[in-house]
Image (tube, rainbow, N blue to C red):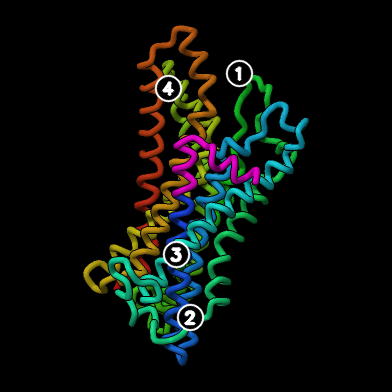
Amino acid sequence: MLALRLARRGQPVVQLRRLLVAAASAGTGFLLLCTLGYALGHPDASAASLLRLAWCVVPLAATVYLAVAVARTDPGTRPRPGLSAVGLGPARLTLLAAVSTAVACTLGSMLALLFFLHLRGDLSGLPFDGAARGLLAADRPLPLAAALTLLTLVPLAASAASAVVLRPRAAKPGERQDPADPAAPVPAPNGLPWGVALLAVGLSVETYASRAHAAAGVPMPGGLGGSPSGVLAGWTVTAVGLALAGPGLTYLCGKALQSVRPGAARLLAGRVLQEEARRIGRPLGVVCAVAAGAYAGITLYSGRHPLGPLSTLGGILVVACTVATLVTAAIEAKHARSDTKAALLRLGAPAGLLRGAAALRALALLAVFGPLTWAVAELAALPLAP
């Protein structure tokens, strides 16, 4: 009940984030139900049904990633002075965050079920009822237990991931603590070497596996042909490498801004990037991985194979969730700097200085992550080019 009250009394921006999680959960739940519909309509194609279910893991992971980011920034479950006295300690707040995430995802899953039943023709009285009867095997009875089992995947995975990420823990050696000396140097994230190594390994695996391209590969969504399983595994390793390297690259962007006789704007911009490297670096790396994959896919398959509606929905879900996670992390970083910004304004810092520093941060990140995304996409598509 407390989680429901906190969700109901949230600010409009917080409610919008929760609605985004519900929408992502609805889209993923609909994809899972469509997989069930395909299995009902093609009882002899069990391998194809399992493959479609396996491809749903990608939008499922993107939805869980967004749900965790929203749960992290939820002010209703953020530790505040005095809450421990009324029984809302860190462990209880973590439980509330998990329950709030489960509520939003369950709402989306129920919407997905209603829409699925509506397109099957099981619910009438609305426009487009029964519009996808053939695609969703409306001539066969729907196993309710199987449908509900699939719909619980997103709420369970999102709430469990939120509980794990937000669990009470001791501060890591490289993390800053309150009160912290603002003049102390910001320690660099330690994931850059691992990220670069995984990036190189992933690209190497893709290149090696592409030599077996003539062999039967794993079919891609939407009828895009097949790709060797080693290529897909290499791309997965590449994406993980980009995510791990993101914080370190963001930190280096901040360090580069402060080099060679910097002015006030460059100093401020570089310092902020170093402070926020861990918060926004990983979402930046994930967006780079998704953008590189989308670019490689468009380059290889544009004009050759039309994407089906479900593949389009899955791609939109992945892109939207990763971009929304990055925007959420950026808003969280902005709120974390609100006290510092107010202090600078009280000291007489011009507003133009703060806007200039923000523009410098954006340009520095774009100058590094833009070419990196293009290079990874080209290298990933090169082994598969005909």
Compute the Cα span from label 1 to label 4. Answer: 16 Å
Residue at the bottom extreme, as displayed:
44
Quick check: 304 above or below 357?
below
Q: Earlier in the sequence, mark 1 or mark 4?
A: 1
* Residue mark closest to the camera, 4 vs 2: 2
Callout 1, which amino acid? Ala
Q: Which residue is mark 4?
A: 266
Q: Earlier in the sequence, mark 4 or mark 2?
A: 2
For this view, does 100 lie left or right of residue 322? right
For this view, does 355 lie left or right of residue 87? left
Give the main secondary structure, helix, strand or loop, of the magenta stretch: helix
Quick check: 322 above or below 235?
above
Residue 383, percent from left and from top: 37, 69
Q: Are marks 4 and 2 in contact (CB under 8 Å)?
A: no
Q: Which residues are magenta?
A: 1-19
Q: Which residue is mark 3?
A: 112
Callout 2, which amino acid? Leu
Callout 3, which amino acid? Ala
Residue at the front extreme, as displayed:
125
Q: Are marks 2 and 1 in contact (CB under 8 Å)?
A: no
Compute the Cα span from label 1 to label 3. Answer: 51 Å
Q: Which residue is mark 1?
A: 183
Q: Nearer the viewer, residue 135 or 212?
A: 135
Q: Which residue is mark 2?
A: 142
Callout 4, which amino acid? Arg
Residue 65, percent from left and from top: 53, 53
Secondary structure category for the residue under label 4: helix
Quick check: 312 above or below 258?
below
Q: Quadrant of residue 24?
A: bottom left
Q: Earlier in the sequence, mark 4 or mark 3?
A: 3
